[in-house]
């Protein structure tokens, strides 16, 4: 008889954003005249930058010739893209990352989920709380957690590291026995918080001392605007010996419809003496979710002079929206943070509302969609996430509605 992986049965309900989508569709069906503005799911709205579009067209034309045709991409990704990434994202920042330590994929979300496959199921995990749900969910599916505690809104066996106003949404080092796998995300999704280099160095030192591995999600590093905030964990001394880093083109360059990302696994990272770099390369060869040649050429264009200038303009657009949302919320009497180094604004729900109660309130009273904080973990309750990925006109209208509701 066919059996299933019973770890999947531990997952409560449906995926957070699927639940949001269902509720919005039901509301729109019942209110066909309502103009619903989404400040919730983090999809970009700006079109692909011209320099990237030119690269896409050129690559398509290449594929139509015998000389320029490309079939399956190399397991690690094309050298032209890995070399470009190594130079611009790391070496120019003083990080000694080689091209062959970079693994090209179809997105950071996939890598953040799939990376746990390379570690034993007896490893303990620690996550910021609140946190992007993929980190926990993928470990639940692998059997690395206990059952879900509905009352406490958490899984047994997971170390939840509280991130709230009292610690500027940056977690404290865990007390007691050190976790084996530590997920960190900065700039953070959902809170928009960042970490300073001295604070991040403490985590690197902690991981090296305890034999832990840090899984560092830097998908939003391009939105950093303040000085002194690291764009990569490899800016910290010793990080190559204890950290894996994830990057994405989705928000940085608007690739949510193209799908491209990469993961960095340094050759110096060898837990228990194992060649983690080699094991991940082996995994890529077997289960690689590859990005096609056309998409990788588009990724290369992100780093061109024109591409970088055009993408800076797009990021400036989103961060202008973030400022509009942040200031507008504060003028309306809400407690809000984030929106300075990330396209996310994190607000405290009013009048003791739960985050889902505020979701319904905002949708019904202002026709605005956001993301309930409780979907990101137990310490996300009574908080709410709004995103800056929209038009300036819709953002201004949304804030006007919030001010008057």
Image (cartoon, rainbow, N blue to C red):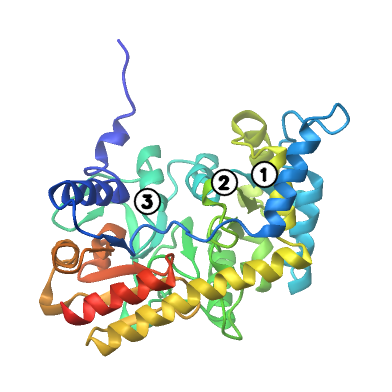
Within 10 Å of disc 1 (Cα), the crowding (few <14, some 14-19, many 20+) is many
- The residue that appears at 31% across and 77% down in the rendered structure is 164
Residue identifier under label 2? 259
For label 2, the SS is loop
Q: Is residue 43 left or right of residue 100?
A: left
In the picture as drawn, the residue positioned furthest to the top comes out as: 1
Seen at 28% across and 45% down, the residue is 146
The residue positioned farthest toward the front in the image shown: 33
The residue beneath circle 3 is: 136
Q: Categorize mark 3 by other alpha carbons within 10 Å: few (<14), some (14-19), many (20+).
A: many
Q: Foreground residue, 151 or 257?
A: 257
Question: Residue 153, position in %: x, y?
Answer: 20, 56
Q: Give the percent coordinates (x, y) of residue 269.
A: 67, 54
> Does the image show residue 237?
no
- Cα gap from disc 2 to disc 3, whole angstroms: 22 Å
State the SS at label 1.
helix
SS of the residue at dot 3?
helix
Q: CA distance from mark 2 to mark 1?
A: 8 Å
């Amino acid at each position: 008889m066919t059996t299933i992986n019973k770890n999947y049965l531990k997952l409560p309900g449906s995926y957070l954003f699927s639940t949001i989508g269902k509720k919005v569709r039901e509301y729109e069906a019942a209110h066909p005249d309502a103009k619903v503005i989404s400040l919730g799911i983090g999809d970009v709205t700006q079109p692909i930058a011209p320099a990237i579009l030119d690269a896409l067209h050129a690559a398509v034309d290449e594929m139509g010739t015998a000389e320029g045709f490309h079939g399956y991409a190399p397991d690690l990704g094309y050298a032209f893209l890995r070399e470009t990434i190594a130079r611009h994202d790391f070496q120019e920042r003083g990080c000694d990352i080689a091209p062959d330590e970079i693994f090209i994929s179809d997105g950071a979300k996939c890598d953040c989920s799939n990376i746990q496959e390379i570690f034993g199921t007896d490893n303990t995990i620690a996550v910021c709380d609140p946190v992007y749900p993929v980190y926990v969910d993928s470990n639940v599916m692998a059997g690395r957690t206990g059952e879900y505690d509905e009352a406490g809104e958490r899984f047994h066996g997971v170390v939840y590291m509280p991130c709230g106003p009292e610690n500027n949404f940056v977690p404290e080092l865990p007390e007691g026995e050190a976790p084996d796998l530590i997920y960190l995300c900065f700039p953070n999704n959902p809170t928009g918080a960042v970490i300073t280099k001295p604070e991040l160095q403490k985590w690197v030192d902690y991981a090296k001392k305890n034999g832990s591995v840090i899984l560092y999600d830097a998908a939003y590093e391009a939105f950093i605007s303040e000085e002194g905030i690291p764009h990569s964990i490899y800016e910290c001394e010793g990080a190559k010996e204890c950290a894996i880093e994830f990057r994405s083109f989705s928000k940085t360059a608007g690739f949510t419809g193209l799908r491209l990302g990469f993961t960095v696994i340094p050759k110096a990272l060898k837990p228990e003496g194992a060649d983690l770099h080699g094991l991940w390369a082996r995994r890529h060869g077997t289960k690689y979710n590859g990005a096609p040649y056309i998409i990788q050429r588009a990724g290369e264009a992100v780093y061109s002079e024109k591409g970088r200038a055009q993408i800076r303009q797009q990021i400036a657009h989103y961060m202008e929206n973030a400022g509009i949302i942040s200031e507008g919320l504060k003028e309306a009497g809400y407690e809000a943070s984030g929106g300075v180094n990330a396209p996310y604004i994190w607000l405290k729900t009013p009048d003791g509302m739960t985050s889902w109660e505020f979701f319904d309130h905002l949708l019904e009273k202002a026709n605005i969609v956001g993301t309930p904080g409780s979907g990101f973990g137990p310490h996300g309750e009574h908080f709410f996430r709004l995103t800056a990925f929209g038009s300036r006109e819709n953002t201004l209208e949304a804030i006007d509605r919030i001010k008057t509701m």
